[in-house]
Amino acid sequence: MTKKTHPLAEALLDAHVQFTLEQLEGEELKAVVAELLDEGLADAAKLKLSEAVTKKQIKDTAHTYAANLDLGAGIPELVGEIARVVHAHPALDDTRLSALMSDRQFEEFTDLVLEQRSAREAIVRGVVASPLYGRIASELLLSGIRGYLSQSNLGENIPGARSMMKLGKAVLSRAAAVSGLDDTVEEGLRRYIAKSVGSASQRAVEMLLDEEGDEILRDAALRAWKELKNLRLGELRRHIDERTLEEFFVTGFEYWRELRKAPIYTQLIDAGIDAFFERYGKVSLKALLDDLGIDRDLMLAEAMRHAPHVIQALKKKKMLEPSVRRLLQRFYHSGAFEKALAAHGG
C-alpha cells in the first residue's frame, strides 16, 4: 500500500509548485535569473578552478568525447548532407575572398610565413632535391630549346645561313633515320640539361633563401593575392563539384575517426589541459570567466535568449507543471517533511 501523505504536505506542495511557476514567467523570470546569476558569480569569486574540478576529471571527460565516444552511423551521412548544403548555398555567389581576408591580414600572414626560415629552407631544399622536380625542369628546358631551334630566325640576317641550316637538318635527319643519331643527340642533351638543372636549382635555392628572396616571394604572393582576392567563392564550383566536396568532408571525417585512436591525439589533449590548469588552476572561477570574456551581461543575455522559449514550449505541451511538481514533491512526500513538522510541534 502507498503511504498516505500528510494533508499539510499536499497543501504546501501545491503552493510551492504554483509559486515556482509564477517565478518562471514574464519579467519575474528575468529578475529570478539575474538574482541567481549574481549569487552564483559571488560564490564563483570564492572558489578556485582546482577546488571545483581536477585535471583528471577534465581529462577523463575530454577522452570520453574526443577519443572514446562511439559516434553513430548517421554522422557521415549528416556530414555529407551539410557539404551539399554548403556547396549550393547562394551566399557563395556574393562572397569574395577579400571578404574573408583583408589585404592587411594577408600581408601579415605572408610575413609570418616568410619568417619561418628553417621550415621554408627544408621545404625548398626538399622540393629541389626531388627527382620529380628535376624531371619537370629538364622537360621544360628541353621543350624550350626544341621550340627555339625550330622557330629561330637566327640565320635570317646572315647570307646563306638559312640554306646551310636546312642542309644540316636534312643530313642529320637522314643520319638519324639510319643510325639512331637523333636519339643519341637528344639523350646527350638530356644529360647536359639535367646536370645544368641541378646546379642552377641550387643557385635558385640560395637566392630564395636570402633576404632578397624574401622580397621576391613576398612580391609574388601579394601579386597573386591581388589577382585572386576578387574571386567569388561560387566560382570555385567549376573546379569542385558537389560530389567532390561531399567526399572531401566524409573522407576528412573518417580520417579524424582514425586519428582519434592514435596515442598522440590524447597526449596532446592532456598537454593542453595541463597548460590550462597551470595557468588557471589557482585562479577563481569568476576571474577565469572574466579572462575568457564571459561577463554577467553576456550570461544573463544568453539565459534569457533560451529560457523563456523552453519554458513556453513545456507549458504549451502541458509538461511544465508536472516537471516542477516532480522536482519538489520528493521532499514533501518523504519522511523528512514529517520529521521537520513534528520537530516544530506540527
Image: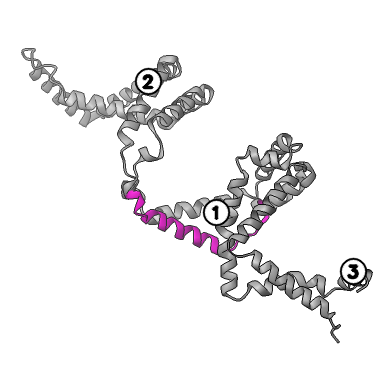
Give the residue number, with chain letter if any, for mark 2.
216
Q: How crowded is mark 2: few (under 14 residues within 10 Å), some or many (20 or more)?
A: few
**Dot placed on the residue nearer the N-terminal end, 1 or 2:** 2
Identify residue type, mark 1: Glu
Q: In which quarter of the image is the N terminus?
A: bottom right
Magenta span of residues? 67-93
| Quarter of the rendering containing residue 128 | top left
Give the residue number, with chain letter if any, for mark 3.
340
For label 1, the SS is: helix
Which x, y percent locates residue 334? Answer: 85, 73
Residue farthest bottom in this picture: 1
In this picture, is 125 found above or below 45? Answer: above
In 3D space, how far apart are the residues under numbered discs 1 and 3 (Cα atoms)?
59 Å
Side (left or right) of 142 relative to 125: left
Which x, y percent locates residue 306? Answer: 57, 59
**Dot placed on the residue nearer the N-terminal end, 2 or 3:** 2
The one of 126 and 87 positioned closer to us in this rendering: 87
| Quarter of the rendering containing residue 189 | top left
In 3D space, how far apart are the residues under numbered discs 1 and 2 (Cα atoms)?
40 Å
The stretch drawn in magenta includes residue 171: no
Please name which of the two marks, 1 or 2, marks the residue nearer to the observer.
Answer: 2
